[in-house]
Amino acid sequence: MKYWNKYLLPSTVDEALSCLHDASGIARVISGGTDLLLDIRQGRLPGVDTLVDVTRIPEMREMQSYPSGLYLGGAVTHREIISNSLLQLQAACLVQACSLIGGPQVRNVATIGGNAAYALPAGDGTIALLALDAEVEIASPLGRRWVRVEDLFLGPGEVVFNRAEEILVQFRIPGLRDGEKSLFKRIMRPQGVAIAILNMAGWMRVSD
């Protein structure tokens, strides 16, 4: 069975937006695809003609530190987050959350942008981004805008942006100041890769 007709690999965000526009609402952005491909194959997302793969867009693969905060591309994988020494210091709860997502095979391909775009209540990475007061940059045919991650969601699986026309380009996380730390914990079934029953992430300031 053929699940889609076109698989495109743009090299810039603008090119990816053009691909989405040309597909007239029957395209989806794909990076890791760990949730998206399951939904397509199981019939929960019918009518997708074109997949636009953003994993070759350099802007969406970067992890950088600037005075305004940490910048994390939407196509960065969970494995890359876990192994980044700067994030280990400045966004420990995100590193801890990403280390608990799926198994090694999933973490090698699944991305932080996909985690947020899918808006699942049990999304470990998303919970950590909320605790860190992160923002996300959304690109559309009309330009770009920054939205707080907490304002990204309308409900389980529902978001404020149009998945057929817009792209989560990157996240901005405020840098920790002296005495500040973050932490992620979760309660889950005994299986090592089970979905969480309860997630908790915190960002706190420690003083004498």
Image (tube, grey):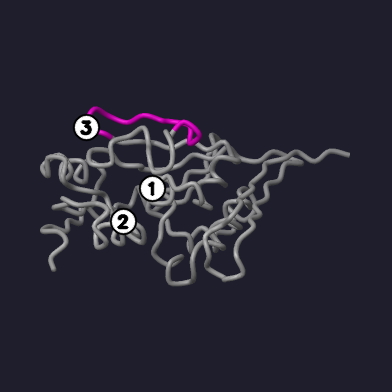
Residue 22 in the image: x percent, y percent?
Answer: 10, 42
Q: Earlier in the sequence, mark 2 or mark 1?
A: 2
Q: Where does the C terminus fall, quadrant-wise?
A: top right
Residue underneath mark 3: 141
User: Which residue is drawn at the image coordinates 12% and 57% (left, top)?
Assistant: 6
At numbered mark 1, what does the secondary structure look like: helix, strand or loop? Answer: helix
Of circles 2 and 3, the one toward us is 2
Query: Dot 2, crowdedness within 10 Å: few (<14), some or many (≥20)?
Result: some
- Give the total number of marks visible in the rendering: 3
Quadrant position of residue 96: bottom right
Callout 3 amino acid:
Pro
As measured in the structure, the alpha-carbon distance from the residue carrying label 3 to the one carrying label 1 is 21 Å
**Residue hosting label 2:** 36
Query: Mark 3 against mark 1, which lies toward the viewer?
Result: 1
Q: Are marks 3 and 1 in contact (CB under 8 Å)?
A: no
Q: Quadrant of the N terminus?
A: bottom left
- Tell me what residue is drawn at x 36 percent, y 29 percent: 145
Give the residue type at disc 2. Leu
Q: Which residues are magenta?
A: 140-151
Q: Which mark is residue 118?
A: 1
Front residue (pair 9, 5): 5
Q: Amino acid at mark 1?
A: Tyr
Q: What is the x, y in percent for residue 100?
A: 56, 62
Which comes before the other along the chain, label 2 or label 3? 2
Q: Residue at x 42, y 44 (%)?
A: 119
Question: Looking at the picture, how far across and down is residue 58, in whole percent?
Answer: 33, 52
For this rendering, which residue is in front, 169 or 12?
A: 169
